[in-house]
Image (cartoon, coloured by chain):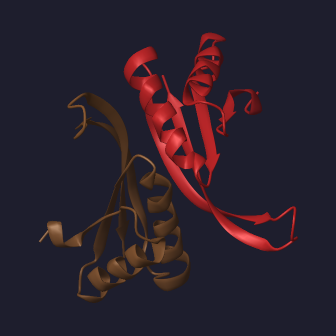
Chain colours: A brown, B red
Amino acid sequence: MSDMSTVLIGKKPAMNYVLACLTVIQNGSNSVTLKARGRAISKAVDVAQILTRRFATDVGVKNIAINTEQVKSIETGAMSNVSSIEIILER
Amino acid sequence: MSDMSTVLIGKKPAMNYVLACLTVIQNGSNSVTLKARGRAISKAVDVAQILTRRFATDVGVKNIAINTEQVKSIETGAMSNVSSIEIILER
């Protein structure tokens, strides 16, 4: 069940992820977790703000954690570090 | 004194801001606050991770807050919302 309440932020417009979060919440979940890496981190913050301020004002930020993940390049096979963020939203 | 321990993340390379944070810490401050808006949010997370994992391993993340700020466009004068982040690092 925990996987179902996680929304991975990627390259789509922020609004797509806001809708994904709203779907999770309207299916009865009390919390939804946003995860993003690299440049998508800014978008994750946007999604959290749009959601909690406009569409689900009863939902708030419970916790934010940042981390570093090792990513292997598909092209060169080299390892590189990329920052990640995890925003837990809760009703 | 609180202004002196705040580093505003902008368009320069991440390493510039890491050095700015190190300067704050080496001047005797026990905490440094990173602030960023919009796309610079990802870079703020990078700076926090590079600093705490490589250059100042005795410094850790104390708190992370996200918010929305209203910005007035210089060109059109229109108001728009922009996400912001505040990362408090502490020894």
Task: Identify the residue shown where x is 22% and y is 41%.
Answer: A74
A68 lies left or right of A61: left
- Residue placed at 45% from the left, 15% from the top? B55
The residue nearer to you, when weighing A32 against B79, is B79
Q: Whole-percent x and y of residue B8?
A: 68, 37
Could you say which quadrant of the image residue A10 lies in? bottom left
Give left or right: position of A29 versus B29: left
Q: Is residue A63 above or below residue B11?
A: below
Nearer to me, B83 or B16: B16
Percent across and percent down for residue B75 are 87, 65
Residue B27 in view here: yes
Q: Which residue appears farthest toward the front when viewing the image? A: A75
Q: Residue at x 74, y 27 (%)?
A: B4
Q: Is residue B57 visible?
A: no
Q: In which quadrant is the N terminus of chain B drawn?
A: top right
Residue pictured at 64% horizontal, 21% vertical:
B20
Residue farthest to the left, as pictured: A1
How many numbered discs?
A: 0
| Residue A39, image x, y percentages | 46, 49
